[in-house]
Amino acid sequence: MSVQHEHEAVGKALSRCESDPHTLVQILRETQELAGWLFRAVLGVGARELTLNLAHVEVAVGFYRFFHTRPVGRLSTPDLKWPSRADTRSQAWRLAAAPRPRG
C-alpha cells in the first residue's frame, strides 16, 4: 500500500468526521480500515489537521490494541493444521516421562 493511498484514507476519515478532535478514535479506526494500518506520517497529518500534538495521537494509538502501526500479517495454512500423530505421541511421551511432584 502506498503512502499516497494512506494519506487519502486519513483525508476521507477527516472529512467524514468534520475534523473534530473529539472524534480522534473514530478517525483512526476509519483510516486503519481504509489503509490497513496506521503509518506514522499519516498520524502526523491527522494530528496537524485536528490541531493535536503528534504525541497525543500516538498515545491514543498505543492505548487501543486494535490499532496497528505496522502491516498486519495473515495466518498461513500450516499454522491452522491439527498436530500430526507423531507430534501427539512425542508430547504424550514427554508428559509420561516428566517427574511428578511429591506430596
Image: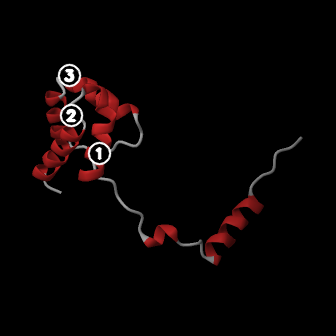
Nearer to us: label 1 or label 2: 2
Quarter-of-image position of residue 29: top left
Give the color scheme: rainbow, by chain, secondary structure or one colour.
secondary structure
Q: Which mark is residue 12?
A: none
Residue 93: x %, y % from top left: 72, 67
The answer to whether residue 3 is seen in the rendering is yes
Marks 3,1: beta carbons within 8 A: no
Q: Secondary structure under badge 1? A: helix
> Whole-percent x and y of residue 101?
82, 45
Label 3 vs 1, first from the N-terminus: 1
Residue denoted by label 3 = 53
Q: Residue 18 carries which label?
A: 2
Q: Which residue lies furthest to the left in this view?
A: 4
Residue beneath disc 1:
30
Q: Quadrant of residue 76?
A: bottom left
Mark 1 surroundings: few (<14), some (14-19) or many (≥20) residues within 10 A: some
Is mark 1 in CB contact (under 8 Å) with mark 2?
A: no
